[in-house]
Image (cartoon, rainbow, N blue to C red):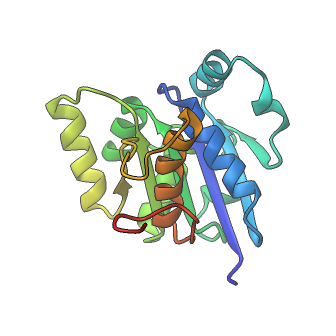
């Protein structure tokens, strides 16, 4: 199994539960190192939506969103994937415009320039033309936009199971095998 080094960026969009489930699943994957970067609003929304301070005790190294000395702020690092979940439209706009003004947007810029995996999980609705144009620019630059749209064909019995349909899809896009059901499976 190939060793993986992944960064998870958590911005201020609603949907902290997606970040939490993604981190829970990454913690269980052998051979995977993960680093976490919260934007200030991402931390506030995580605390508000999940009602706890669990973000303070994650089993991953945390980097401040202003720390441009983080290893993944450089293309010479071994980090191969950035997942931003949830991804605010502000973060989408900064990435689409090439504004590397914080560690999350700088890391996205690195992933795009090095032709590595960048996955954005926006949770905004409805979308306006600017949002769509920004997501198109990122897609054309090599990023993957995977909106937090759960699937229901597996008949998920709990909210966590619904959230897992998105978290598992994101992990599959990042190259991991998950135990989630696929369309057409019994």
Q: Residue at x 63, y 54 (%)?
A: 7
Q: Quadrant of the N terminus?
A: bottom right
* Viewer-proximal residue among 65 and 151: 151
Q: How many marks?
A: 0
Q: Position of residue 137 (x, y in %)?
A: 24, 51
* Viewer-proximal residue among 106 and 173: 173
Q: Position of residue 150 (x, y in %)?
A: 40, 43
Q: Residue at x 81, y 31 (%)?
A: 56
* Viewer-proximal residue among 109 and 22: 22
Q: Quadrant of residue 73?
A: bottom right
Q: Position of residue 110 (x, y in %)?
A: 50, 60
Q: Residue at x 36, y 59 (%)?
A: 143
Q: Quadrant of residue 21?
A: top right
Q: Residue furthest front?
A: 186
- Residue 10 visible to an observer of this rendering: no
Residue 36 as seen in the image, left or right of residue 95 = right
Q: Quadrant of the C terminus?
A: bottom left
Q: Is residue 38 above or below residue 166?
A: above
Q: Quadrant of residue 147?
A: top left
Q: Residue furthest left?
A: 129
- Residue 27 visible to an observer of this rendering: yes
Q: Is residue 151 above or below residue 88?
A: below
Q: Residue at x 40, y 41 (%)?
A: 148
Q: Position of residue 175 (x, y in %)?
A: 52, 72
């Amino acid at each position: 199994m190939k060793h993986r080094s992944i960064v998870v960026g958590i911005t201020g969009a609603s949907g902290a539960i997606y970040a939490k489930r993604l981190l829970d699943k990454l913690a269980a994957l052998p051979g995977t190192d993960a680093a976490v970067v919260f934007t200030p609003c991402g931390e506030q929304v995580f605390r508000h939506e999940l009602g706890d301070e669990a973000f303070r005790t994650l089993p991953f190294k945390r980097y401040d969103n202003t720390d441009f000395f983080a290893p993944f702020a450089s293309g010479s690092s071994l980090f191969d994937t950035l997942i931003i979940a949830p991804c605010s439209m502000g973060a989408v706009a900064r990435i689409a415009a090439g504004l590397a003004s914080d560690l999350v947007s700088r890391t996205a810029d690195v992933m795009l320039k090095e032709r590595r995996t960048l996955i954005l999980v926006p949770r905004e609705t409805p979308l306006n033309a600017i949002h769509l144009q920004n997501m198109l620019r990122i897609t054309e630059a090599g990023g993957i936009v995977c909106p937090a749209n759960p699937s229901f064909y597996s008949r998920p019995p709990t909210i966590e199971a619904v959230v897992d349909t998105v978290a598992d899809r994101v992990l599959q896009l990042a190259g991991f095998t998950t135990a989630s059901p696929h369309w057409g499976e019994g």
